[in-house]
Amino acid sequence: MTTSCAPAPAFDAESLDALSEGEIDGLDHGVIQVDAAGTILRYNRAESRLSGRAPERVIGRNFFFDVAPCTRLPAFYGRFREGLRRGLLDETFSFAYGFDPQPLHVRVTLRRSAVPNRYWILTEVLGRVAVSPQREAVRAAVDQRVRAEPVDPTLCEREPIHIPGAIQPHAALLVAEAAGLTVIACSANAAEALGEVPLDRPLAALLPAAIVDAAGQLGADPASGGRILRQRITLPPENTPFEAVMHRVGDRVLVELERAPLHPEDFASASLTAVEEALGRLRAADDLAQAAATAAREIRRLTGFDDVLVYRFDPEWNGEAIAEDKDPAWERSLLGLRFPAADIPAQARALYTRARSRFVIDRDYVPVPLLATPTANAPVDLTFAQSRSLSPIHLEYQRNLGVNGSMSVSILVEGRLWGLVIGHHRRPHYVAPETRAAAGVLTDALALRIHEMESRRLWREQQDHLASENRLVSELARSDDVITALTAGETTLLDFFGATGAAIVSDGAVRRLGVAPPDEAVLAIAAHLRATLPPERSGYASCEFAAEHPASAAYADRASGVLAAFTDPRRDHLLLWFRPEVPSTVTWGGDPRKTVLAAAGTDTVLPRRSFERWVEERRGASEPFAAWQIGLAEALAQVVEGVVLRQRRKIAELTTLLTEKEALLAEKDILAKEIDHRVKNSLQIVSAFLHMQRRQVTDPAAKQAFAETMGRVMSVARVHDSLYRTASVDEVDLGQTIENLCADLAVMAGDRHTLALDAEPGLMVPYRKAVALSLIATELVTNAFKYAYDDDAAGGRVAVSVAGEPEGRVRLSVRDEGRGLPEGWAESPARGTGLGMKLIRAMLEQINARIEVEPCAGACFTVTA
């Protein structure tokens, strides 16, 4: 942050114009002459001594873009451009140069020369800027470091980076009590922006009413912590534009003031059109790699960084640069490199999760300390502050990377830190507020695309495995030999989870499939899991099993990864899947074992210096198993136990008690009932998986489709439940079945609709007819819920009746009191997918039934079968 200051140097533009080259060189003040484009024409010795740059090295180069890019700010370059537009360049202000090793506080004067297209930049040293003890310690350690030793990486994690006690100098900060909005702390440069020291002053006396009102809203709402409000304001005496950013932390309201460009085109601010075009290209990406590459390219195009990376975290928080777009002239490339978790320690990741973006204009900036009143007895939490000063360790890390200006924007997927979009610049680099916001919008769009792609991939994988499970369950239900059904049918254990080997351990015997360890090794694995897996857990997975069970290291080529699920409480039966070792070569950006170094003989922690490619060969690890795969393995084990093993035990018990003929008949009844019971349970499992998947999608149509499918599944499940509860294995009490089904449908309807039922008791019908009528009833009732009543209405009543007819036929009626059927409804295109009516027609044809539409207040459908 810079501001006007007085007095100006004791010479003006006219006197400078009259001086010779030698006389200008003899001045004590720094003198630079530039043209309207900023090209340096003169550079005197005093300025050379201040900057350390010889005149011959800078004359002919651009001062703002090339020689001193740290000045390309609204407070410096913006003033220069405004003076050119007005035709009157007459500005004096203070500025801090972050010269290494000694930063300087200077007074800058901008003057127009009498010579056309000539302008003067005058520099007068006001004093040296004190370096913070933390930064001084890091610099001293770097200077004296001859040999560094690895130290505990948690030393970095304990650094309180959210309370640095300083901000970056391009902004000013006011900290007010939330209750009264009185300033209790501020940055040391706040007086320069406001024209007075703001401590103990109310915000209303310092800032425009609009921003004070917004701050008051934050102060009155304790739940607004972290919510960011932005406003563009002007401050006297010259109506200078400022970007005001406000947020609340605890019982304090923080207001950041950053001088904004009066003309955005001077700083390449992103336009709405450019952002929309970039979003369109991002939406067109087909996969993650293309989306990441597009995001890197478009964000670099908007922000102007030399290099933009998309950086993804793995489960251990190591990072990988999965996409990069950079200046071809920068030979350094980070694409494909991995970086250890300690490079971005835990507290930094937590900060990235809460505060989504961070921009650094100049790595060598001079931090502006915070001042406070005596009543402000706690450090100022700068977690959400846009201008928060960075850790000296991080700044040294940037120096080691060859980076000056930088950007980090968090990629949050479902609230979790998935990765970062990182911008690197070899020189100081200012990004206008509008462009920073555009980078955030594009990063959010990338996060949505990642979530969409990952959700689709996960959904496809889960659906494929659910289909395989359904086929396997069907085979189990038909088979007399559980082991054969699991290992030799059309669908086997080997069709699950991308395994190359599988095995079943049952009462000490082993059956293997595919590429699996020998029987004795499988039994040893089973014994290890039986002894070490907690009693409350039935499932287990590891992608580095030999690390836990060294005896299995000999079989790494076939069993580096193990997924297992016990099927019974006694753990006599175990399902196993194996994945082979996948040898991999990981290329790190430097040796990951030396992520944090301590300077010899000091307590100062330093980041590593080398980012040369360091190759690591990894052995003994397979592709990891996903959490949902463990859950599905456990569910499959339960199905195996429920559908088959319990059946076998029960049949064996009955065989010993009954005669051969009676036993066979009893077994038929029990088996049929148990199958109905287990099929019902299996259908409920399928319904539960559908419900889980429904919660993961956001598209309303998809949610509705999942809900309808769940209803259809549960209607069939109710028929099997009725079969299980009745004495007959061939007939079902239709009234009881429809009653249970309506209870399920009423729950799905919620409070919006009521469902009435009139069912004739003891109405026994064949199983096949019961299934068809249950599905028809489900479709008619759900259609009434969806279409009979207006969306904004309170809902209505749907009545269902079931009664017997002569000659063993039954009548099913579904009636609503809604809007009724439109004319020509039978020939009109179906609303929705039309799947429901197709299903009804198929069921009618299957049981040789007919459907009639009767006139009533709403719509009435009667099925006779």
Image (spheres, rainbow, N blue to C red):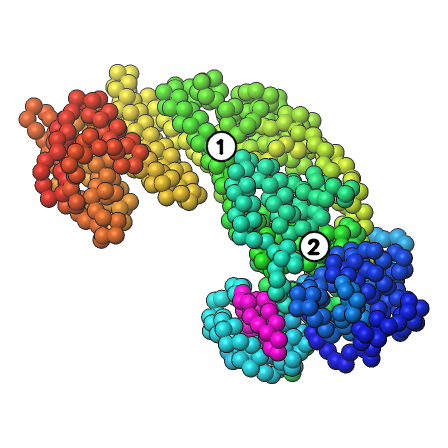
Q: Which residues are magenta?
A: 230-253
Q: Secondary structure at mark 2?
A: strand
Mark 2 residue type: Ser
Q: Which of the two labelled residues, at mark 1 and mark 2, occupies the earlier sequence position?
A: 2
Task: Count residues near mark 2 (Cα–Cα under 10 Å), then give few for <14, some for 14-19, many for 20+.
Answer: many
For this view, does 163 lie left or right of residue 455?
right
Q: Position of residue 282 (x, y in %)?
A: 55, 42
Residue 571 vs 120, above or below: the answer is above
Residue 247 pos. (x, y %): 55, 67
Q: Is disc 1 surrounded by few (<14), some (14 to 19) or many (20+) residues within 10 Å?
A: some
Residue 757: x, y in percent?
A: 15, 42
Q: Between 293 and 687, which is closer to the camera in this rendering?
A: 293
In the rendered image, the vertical position of residue 440 relative to residue 314, given as above or below: below
Residue name at image x 84 percent, y 75 percent: 15
Task: Name the residue rendered at 49%, 41% in the picture.
Answer: 452
Image quadrant where one finds the N terminus: bottom right
Q: Amino acid at mark 1?
A: Glu
Question: How far apart are the two marked residues, 1 and 2, measured between alpha carbons?
Answer: 39 Å
Q: Is residue 295 left or right of residue 735?
A: right
Measured as percent of width and height from the top left, residue 734 is found at 18, 32
Splitting the image into 4 quarters, where does residue 256 fall? bottom right
Residue at 61% over, 33% down: 623
Q: Which residue is mark 2?
A: 406
Residue 812 within the magenta-colored segment of the rendering: no
Q: Which residue is mark 1?
A: 461
